[in-house]
Image (tube, rainbow, N blue to C red):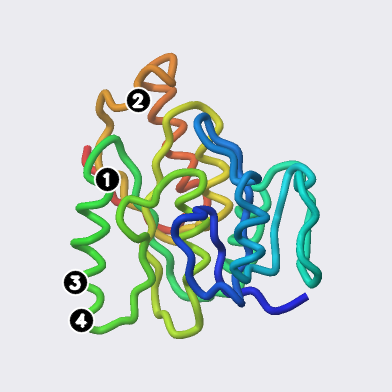
């Protein structure tokens, strides 16, 4: 199997094709498995899949079957995170995550090489894609994490493993996913269970 340094999940956005792995994921309105054959013809050689391809693939294609492509990409990101020894700041809250991340990253980048979440990559998929990009050239990581229902944050915590945390605020966003504001707060605080420092507003 060839070396992989790029993780792809969107068949429309291809880069570093010959060193990429495509994770076929199923969503409400899409199924990445439908594009495997097309992507193989374009040169991608490694696929992580949940079900067998509908048609035979070209020779030289590597197939890894998993129960969940999402869990697989999270596990890979955990391994990448484990290789990074610098401080990692995680940001969560109902609002303001991206603004705080960009503000903090801009300030730090004057003296440090900063790995950060692109755009608003703070979901169960966005977080591992963000953390995957951290490397030996970086001095610090700044990542945001967002949840919309119970039991999501522990997965993000294990991927980010923050040494420092920032809780922006707790508002009404996604409140339908939680039984009470107290439960919502506790769920968000799961992100910082092992953090050395937590910054928040009282």
Q: Contact (CB < 8 A) between labels 1 and 4?
A: no
The Cα–Cα distance between marks 4 and 2, rounded to whole angstroms, is 35 Å
Q: Is residue 174 above or below residue 4?
A: above
In the picture, the disc for residue 107 is 3
Residue drawn at 66 percent across, 63 percent down: 40
Q: At numbered mark 1, what does the secondary structure look like: helix, strand or loop?
A: strand
Residue of label 4: 110
Residue drawn at 28 percent across, 32 percent down: 170
Label 4 or label 2, whichever comes before in sequence order: 4
The Cα–Cα distance between marks 2 and 3, rounded to whole angstroms, is 30 Å
> Which residue is more in the foreground, 159 or 11?
11
Label 2 or label 3, whichever comes before in sequence order: 3
Residue of label 1: 200
Label 1 or label 4, whichever comes before in sequence order: 4
In the picture, the disc for residue 174 is 2
Circle 2 or circle 3, nearest the eye? 2
Q: Give the crowd class for mark 2: few <14, some 14-19, many >=20 residues within 10 Å.
A: few
Query: Visible in this render: residue 70?
Result: no
The Cα–Cα distance between marks 1 and 3, rounded to whole angstroms, is 19 Å
Q: Is residue 3 above or below residue 157?
A: below
Q: Contact (CB < 8 A) between labels 3 and 4?
A: yes
Q: Contact (CB < 8 A) between labels 4 and 2?
A: no
The Cα–Cα distance between marks 1 and 4, rounded to whole angstroms, is 24 Å
Circle 1 or circle 3, nearest the eye? 3
Residue drawn at 43 percent across, 39 percent down: 189
């Amino acid at each position: 199997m060839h070396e992989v340094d790029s993780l792809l999940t969107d068949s429309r956005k291809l880069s570093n094709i010959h060193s990429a792995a495509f994770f076929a994921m199923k969503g409400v309105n899409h199924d990445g498995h439908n594009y495997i054959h097309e992507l193989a013809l374009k040169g991608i050689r490694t696929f992580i899949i949940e079900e067998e391809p509908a048609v035979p693939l070209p020779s030289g294609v590597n197939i890894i079957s998993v129960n969940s492509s999402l869990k697989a990409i999270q596990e890979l990101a955990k391994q990448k995170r484990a290789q990074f020894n610098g401080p990692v700041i995680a940001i969560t809250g109902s609002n303001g995550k991206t603004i705080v991340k960009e503000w903090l990253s801009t300030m730090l980048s004057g003296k440090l090489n900063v790995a950060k979440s692109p755009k608003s990559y703070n979901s169960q998929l966005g977080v591992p894609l963000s953390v995957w990009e951290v490397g030996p050239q970086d001095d610090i990581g700044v990542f945001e994490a967002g949840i919309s229902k119970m039991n999501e944050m522990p997965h993000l915590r294990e991927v980010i493993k923050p040494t420092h945390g920032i809780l922006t605020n707790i508002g009404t966003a996604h409140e339908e996913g939680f039984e009470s504001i107290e439960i919502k707060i506790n769920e968000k605080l799961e992100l910082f269970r092992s953090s050395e420092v937590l910054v928040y507003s009282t």
